[in-house]
Image (cartoon, helix red, strand yellow):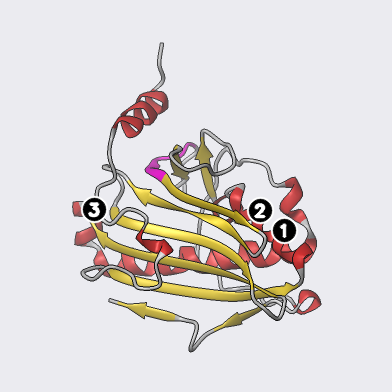
Amino acid sequence: MPTALHRRLEAARAASPNYPEVGATRDARLPAGYAQLRRRIHLGHGPEVLERAGRYVLGWGSQLGSGFAVHPYAPAEQGATVLLRLSLPGLRRPRLVIPCRVVWTVDAPDRIGFAYGTLPGHPECGEEAFLVSMDAAGEVWFEVTAFSRLAAWYARLGRPVAVLCQYLAIERYLAAVAGAAADGTAATTAPATSGTAGPSGTTALSDTGARNTDAPDTAIQR
């Protein structure tokens, strides 16, 4: 007998992204008409940091390290459909189920990462990209890029709260990847079965030179 989660997954696999600009986070210029966000953090120096952080990101480490569960769990592959699940305070079982599809991946000597787009049932419509890159000087960076509009009625009703929650989630993504780049946990990341996300600032880690970078690398447009 299919479970409710399995039925949700099958419905998500049969659906198309609920926005037309699929893959646009690969471009330097994001599409108009959406809230836009870019956040970047310095992770350290050299190919080992790039590889460690990149594998962590492809393994959904940003999400798992921020309190989300990923179903079904597997490293990100283009075309894969997943359900991100989030436990809510005071409840034993995940209650928020968010359908997403991986719309692109990259695994190159100087860039590793992926992006997912929203599917019907997601409280927003749009895309988020998670990219670890190494510049010409060997410095390694992690960047989150997003464009989105609120889609669900409950998200539109509580717009200020929804916007704040997205910002705080991205701060947790940055902190999770910074921590993995610093202590080498990327190789041992395992899927979480549940979790609760909450506000968290970006971690600055001096042993690898990890630091949060604001202007000019931070841009939030609404």
Compared with residue 110, is residue 74 higher up or lower down, i.e. above or below?
above
Instruction: Specify the amino acid type for callout 3.
Output: Pro
CA neighbours of label 1 inside 10 A, class few (<14), some (14 to 19), many (20+):
many
- Magenta-span inclusion, residue 92: no
Q: Nearer the viewer, mark 2 or mark 1?
A: 1
| Amino acid type shown at disc 2 | Tyr
Residue denoted by label 3:
20
First of labels 2, 3 by sequence position: 3
Q: Front-most of 4 and 180?
A: 180
Image quadrant in which you'd find residue 175 = bottom right
Give residue 113's position: percent from left, percent from top: 56, 56
**CA–CA distance between discs 3 and 1?**
32 Å
Q: How crowded is mark 2: few (under 14 residues within 10 Å), some or many (20 or more)?
A: many
Q: Return the mark for residue 56.
A: 2
Q: Residue 36 carries which label?
A: none
Rounded to the nearest angstrom, the CA distance separating label 2 from label 3 is 29 Å
Magenta residues span 93-101
Where is residue 114? Give x, y as percent: 51, 54
**Apparent side of residue 143 relative to residue 37 in the rendered image (left or right):** right
Q: Name the residue under label 1.
A: 51
Which badge, 2 or 1, comes first in the chain's sequence?
Answer: 1
